[in-house]
Image: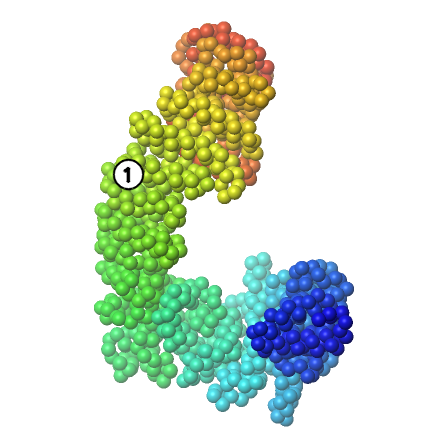
Amino acid sequence: MDINTLKMSEIYSRVAQLLSLTYSGMPDQIKPAEDELKIISQDTQGFLQCLLAIIQAPESHQLLRSASATRFRHLIRESITAGKLSVETRSWLVEAIFQTLISPYTDRSSRGVLNFALNPILGEDGLGVFTNRLASLAITGLSGEGTQIQGSLLVIKSIFSSMTPQFQSADYSKILIPHLVEVGKKGLYMISSGLQSTNEPLITEGINILEDWTSSLRQILEHFEVTSTKNIKDLSEQSEIALLFSNIINFAIPDYQVQNSIINITETPITKPMNNIKVNILKSLNIIIQYLIDFKKKNIEEQGNFPLITVIGTDLPDSPFLSCALSITEPLIISILSISTHAEIEAFLARDFITELMIETLSFFHKVGYERRFYTIFSQYHRQLIVNVCFQFIRIYEKDKELFMTDPEEFAASTQDMCERQESETTKTTSAQLLETLCDAIDGALAFTAYFVQQITDMILSGKGREGIMDYNIIRDFTDFPFMSLDEETKIETSFMVLSILSFPILRRKDILNSIEDLLVNHMERLFSTTSGIIQSRICLFFYFYSDSIFIERSHHFQTCMNFLISCISPNCHKAVNIQACETFSFMMQDEEILFRFEPFIDEVIDKIIQGIENQTEKNFFEALVEMTQNFSDALARKIIPLIAGIVKKIQIETQNLVMGNKKETIILLKLWNVIRTLIMSPSIEKAQLVEFEKHLAPILSYLQIPHQITFVDDIINVVVCIMKKTKNVTDIEWEIFSKLPEIQASQDNSLQCLFKLLNLYLMYGKDHLQEFPQKLAVVLDMAGKAMFATYKGKTRESVNSEGAILYQLALYNYAGYIDHQLNQIFSNAIVRYLQGTTQSFFKVRLLGIILAGFTYNTNLACSILSQQSTDTGITYLRFVLLQIINNSTLFVHSYDKRVAVIGLCSIISLSELPNDIAESISQIFEALIVILSQKMEDKGSKEKTKAMDALIEQLFKSDEEDDFDNEIIVKGTKLLYGESGADALSKTEENEANLLLSQINTPIQIIDEYEYFRGTLATIKSKNQENVKRLFAGLSPQRREQLLEIMQSQRVQVNDLPGENTIVRKIVKAKHR
């Protein structure tokens, strides 16, 4: 169909027809209809205009209107995102949407959808042009009638939700408030008049206006709550709005199901939106009350006093909204008491239009409950609120029991949230908050609540039944309260929940704590033998909050309690019980004040924990096991074999599920490997035990045979590293693992990663074996070469490549005479990779370090190999690398790199016969040595240095005495790794990674003092041929002479407080005699 030939009326009809097909057509009609609509929508403005017309057309049925509004909203969002709407089109849209919103022909549902279409337009309104236009239109619309008011209120809501930067919302709100006051009055008047005259259309219109009015006010306050709370101040002084809030909240619509309630529980077209109106008002009021509370706190902090001081304490500042709050508090209390004691309370809690209003009401009580002006009201009702509201809402219902069975994780999480974090907005959480407020603010409320739940629990566990209620001085006055008629399980679980919620204030009351202890002692046998999973979980929750404070002087009873808790840490218990018990136990294992209390019976606890490892599925159980490993290593060492057997079996089970695809990697595997590593490094585990330990680990270490199927290769490698580090030996099992390393490297795109540390240890502690089996040493060298050229995950990371370079260096230093045949290939790899180019200076240094390490390995052989090949420009590789070392001498800043360079260059200058390439550059090589040793050293610029330098050289030539430096005093130093500022180094992430690796390597190079080594080399050269030393010094500039003096007076000193380093360089001088 050619849409260009169609008239507007025809397009309108066609679009309406196509839209109808999208939701009511046959399956084979839907796609063609969508395709044609897509074609028509290419004329964006025309299509949008057509949709708006359909929405307002009297003949359009509701489904068609909804489909048009939804498509309109989606097209606006897509067009804005794609940048397809011009300024002119958006300007037209703002006007067109507003006119549709206020049209009497637009239904309420479509009006709401269309209003959302404004959000992306306003969100892109950087200059505020469209926002200001809509703001002006809305002010005008508020003076109109019916749908004009409703549409304008929706626009106001959109304006304050969009937060347009250039729109002056504070100024606009001041202009807006008087108009909003009149709208609120009009809406309330229409409802009142409509009810008196039974005019339903009038009631509906009034309710619609008030619903949009309260929603807009709520949005304005939420906007200022986020952007600038000081703007709430002006609103908090609006007495007419406060009066409207009070009148609307107190407006009662008769409800046959509940008496004396301003909260309706019977759903009708009037009561449902009316409850929503009150929700919006209470949310708004809660924002204002919170502002007043914060304002009070701020004044107290800043001024140290406050204008309104009562005998009892500091009051909130005067505000008409405080009067409003006072006027609605008692009616709301009476209403919520009427609902909470209703026989159908559980059914009411399943209805959102009831629970949302109750949640806001409870939250309102929580905010004002601490304020002294409300003390009299809450003091009068606090016992009824505690028992009939808080207990009633906190207690377990059938839906909670169903959750306990079907979603135990959510059951445990919601319970913990109710007692601790209180982040969710539910009747249970807000009731818990109100309970805390009442017990904090009302005198005697805490004691009343704590003793109430203890008495009811004692009555049940003593088997007295309701007949024995008169024996209890508190609960006997509440026999007719609905809570007292509940089943025993519910009353006991509620009692423990209440004690858990109030743990913070109760822990400060020794009298209440003592009575709780007595209750537990008297009924331990019955409590701990209960078969009710819900009660078991509540007791475990109770221990989470009280274990650090109960039975401090009665350790036997504490042990009994903990035995019960440990018995609940079992898959044989209900899952929700197991979850709560594990969370409590994990918390205890992290609390130093609780840990020591386990020591007398820790062996029994460990036995039970070990028995549960294999079938346990809770991460908190394994978190607790990690903590136990760290805190009870001696006790665990006594149980090491059964403990490891249980861990190995569990890892096998988890891995089988992983390999079979039944389960993704779980945190449990990570925790188990963490436990193993912690055990290995524990001082309680002797080196001799580790050999047996490793044999038991063999089944899970063998998973390295399938590196592509597991996700914990790094964990296995790290465990083997830990064992090697501690035993300083390589076992047969570890040599079996060695054969799998090339395959693992291949699976990591030839990068080494955690393999680097392991190969380092093979080189160090497997030296005899590698010397006996050179083919294995060749494997290490091959892996190093591949790592140097690795492209990990499609990217070249020089920190990854440098691992191979360092591995080459380690091999050259430790295996003199064993890799002669590989030396040519090693040099070739180093030079090829160097010529490929480097972006990081540290990697350039590490590549040159391979050649320098080769000089140390065998100077003559290295020179011979490098002299036999030339670059494209015709210079030998020997001359090329020497020039590169000389030209980049300032880059050798890390202590490890400096040592490598100094030892390698000292090997060159120590040669008795210098090759031509070296002889021609000997003075430059010596100068490079001075530059390298001077990196990061402080230059004093002292004039005396030149004279001291000459004296030092003279002493070096004339004196054969022992080195005097041992008796000298350290007077200054400098940190080498990070220099004067750590900020620069920390900004180089990749360099930091590479340098951190250097701090972890195991090699004799790390203990060499390069300054001492340099001095020793010069002394050796001098002892053989004094003229050679003079030749080295002859060409030095005054600056280099000063640096040499500094070097000759420096040494490396051990420290423990540097990141990535454990030594610093300090200048040393002779001690002066007085």
Where, by quadrant of the figure, is residue 501 drawn?
bottom left
**Tag 1: Cα neighbours inside 10 Å, few (<14), some, or many (≥20)?**
some
Q: Where is residue 207 in the image (x, y as percent from the top left)?
A: 62, 82
In the image shown, does 778 or 897 lie closer to the viewer?
778
Please say whether residue 520 is visible from this viewpoint.
yes
Taking depth in this image into account, of 900 and 515 the one nearest to the observer is: 900
Answer above or below: position of 948 versus 672.
above
Taking the spot 68% from the left edge, 84% from the top edge, the residue there is: 59
Q: Which colour scheme is used?
A: rainbow
Left or right: 1019, with 594 as reference point: right
Give percent across and percent down for residue 594.
Answer: 32, 55
Amino acid tagged 1: Ile
User: Is residue 27 depicted above or below 1040 in this figure?
Assistant: below
Which image quadrant: the N terminus?
bottom right
Who's the residue at 26% across and 62% down the image?
Answer: 567
Quadrant (top left, top right, bottom left, bottom right) of the C terminus: top left
Return the x and y of residue 419 as percentages of the image width and height: 41, 66
213 vs 1010, left or right, is right
Q: Which residue is drawn at 47% across and 17% down?
A: 863
Q: How many labels does the image show?
A: 1
Q: In this figure, which residue is indicated by the disc labeled 1?
A: 733
Residue 936 lies, with reference to residue 862, above or below; the image says below
**Picture quadrant of residue 268:** bottom right
Foreground residue among 210 and 314: 210
The reply to whether residue 168 is in sight is no
Residue reaching furthest to the bottom: 197
Q: Is residue 437 above or below residue 198?
A: above
In this rendering, would 376 be left or right of 223? left
Residue 97 in the image: x percent, y percent?
71, 72
